[in-house]
Amino acid sequence: MKNSKRVNKIEPSKSISLSAKIAELKALGVDIIGLNVGEPDFQTPSEIIQATIKALEENKTRYSLVQGLNELRTKISCYLNEKYQLNSDKENIFIGNGSKHILYLIFQTLLDVGDEVIIPTPYWVTFPESVKLAGGEPVFVETNANFQLNIENIRKAITKRTKAILINTPNNPTGAVYVKEDLLKVVELAIEFDLKIIADEAYEILTYDNSDHISIASLSDEAFKLTLSVQSFSKSFCMTGFRIGYLCAENDFIQDVNKLQGHLSGNNCTFSQYGALAALEMNPSIVKGMVNELQQRRDLAYNLFNELFPMEIPTGAFYLFPNVEDYIKKLKLKNCEEFALYILEKANVAILPGSAFGKHGHIRISFAQSSEEIQEAYNRIKGVL
Ligand SMILES: Cc1ncc(COP(=O)(O)O)c(C=O)c1O
C-alpha cells in the first residue's frame, strides 16, 4: 500500500540526509569537518542548564498550558516590547517545539488547498515543504544579485490565491539582513493585497558590522497586526536540542494555532521552557560574547574563502553562500550537488549544495564551527581545488 500523496509530495531535508551520511563516515573513522551544520559549537550557557535541572528536580515534568507557560510568554512579550518597541502581551505569544514546528502550525492554520505563499529564493529548505504539507503552493521569487529582496518580483508574483509573503531575515542560507526600506515596501504590499507576512527571524540576534536586524512587526501598528513573527531560542542561546521556538501574532490567530496544537502534541516540553526563561533572564553579555566570537569567525571564513570563490559578505546568521560555477566547470562536474560531494569525498569537508536552498551553482558554508576547523577546512578545500 502506498503512503499518502501528502507525504510523497514533499522532499526529504537535504541537510538532514547529509548529516546522516556524515555520521556514517565519522563512524568509519573518517575525519570530517562539518561546515554543513546550522548550530554553533558553543556550550549551552550554564544558567540555562542549571535552570532546567532545577525545574526537573522540582518536578516540573507535567503537562502544562498548550500555548506555553504564562511566565515564559510574559517574559517573551516584555523582551520583544523592550527590544523592538512592540505592544505585545502574553496573549500574543505561543510557544512551540522549535520554530520549525511554529511554521508548520502557521501554514496549517492559514492555508487552504491551492493557496499560495511567496518565498524569496534562496530559501531555507523547510519553507516550501511545510507549505506543501498544508496543501499550499510555494511561489518562488528571485532576490537581487546581492540577495536583497526584489520588491517588483514579489509584486508580480501576487495572485488571487496568495495568502502570505514569507520573509526570512537574517537569511539562511545567504546571511543577508534585509534593509528597512524594502521591508516597509513588503508591509505596503501586504496591506494593499490583504496578505499576511510570515517573518522568520530565528537569527534575530546574529548580525555583524553595523547591520541592524529589523523586526517587521515593529514597523507600524498595521505591520504588527498582519505579521506572524517566528522566533527561536535555538540559534540565539545555543538551545537547538531544547526545541523552543515561538510565534508572536494577533491573539485571534494564536487562538486558532492553540486549537490545532491541542490535538497535535499539546504543550512544549515543560522543563525546556524553564531553560528558556533563564535564557531571557541571564546577563546579555553572555549572548554578546557569542555574537562577537561569531563575528570573528565570519571575518576569518569570509577572508579565506573569498580568495577561492566570489561572494557577498554575510552580515547576519552564520553562513557564507558563494558562487562555485567556475569550479564546477573546471572540475567538469554537473552541478553544485556534485561539487559538494567532491569536497566531502576529496577534502573530507561537509558543506551543502545551493540547490537544497533553491539556488544552483552555489554552496553554503557554515562558520559556526571553531576558527581552527574553519582554517583547516579552507586548507583542505584549497588543496583539492
Ligand atoms: C531560517 C530558519 N528558521 C528556522 C529554523 C529552525 O529552528 P528551530 O531549531 O527553532 O526549529 C532554522 C534552522 O536551521 C532556520 O535556518
Image (cartoon, grey):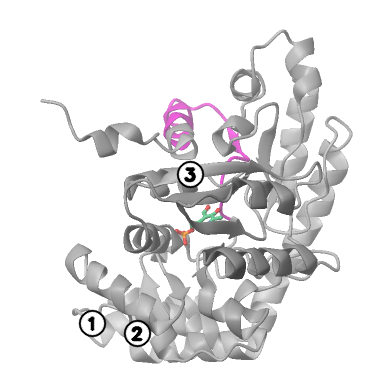
Residue at horizontal 23 percent and vertical 82 percent from the top: 64
Circle 2/circle 3 CB separation < 8 Å:
no
* Residue type at numbered disc 1: Ser
Circle 3/circle 1 CB separation < 8 Å:
no
The residue to which callout 1 is attached is 64
The residue to which callout 2 is attached is 54
Q: Nearer the viewer, mark 3 or mark 1?
A: 3
In the picture, measured across the screen, residue 284 lies left or right of residue 196, that is right
The residue to which callout 3 is attached is 138
Q: Nearer the viewer, mark 2 or mark 1?
A: 1
Residue at horizontal 80 percent and vertical 25 percent from the top: 382
Residue at horizontal 26 percent and vertical 88 percent from the top: 58
Q: Is residue 288 above or below residue 320?
A: below
Q: Mark 3 to mark 1: distance in Å? A: 34 Å
- Dot label at residue 97: none
Considering every residue shown, the one lying at the far left of the view is 1
Q: Nearer the viewer, residue 254 or 334?
A: 254
Q: Quadrant of residue 274?
A: bottom left
**Among the two numbered marks 2 and 1 on one chain, the one whose residue lies closer to the N terminus:** 2
* Residue type at numbered disc 2: Lys
Q: Which residues are magenta?
A: 19-39
Q: Mark 2 to mark 1: distance in Å? A: 17 Å
Q: Nearer the viewer, mark 2 or mark 3?
A: 3
* The N terminus: image quadrant: top left
Crowding near the residue tagged with mark 3, few <14, some 14–19, many ≥20 C-alpha atoms within 10 Å: many
In the picture, measured across the screen, residue 249 lies left or right of residue 140, that is left
* The C terminus: image quadrant: top right
x, y percentage for residue 313?
83, 49
Reply yes or no: does residue 121 show up in magenta: no
Reply yes or no: does residue 33 show up in magenta: yes
Q: Is residue 351 visible?
A: no
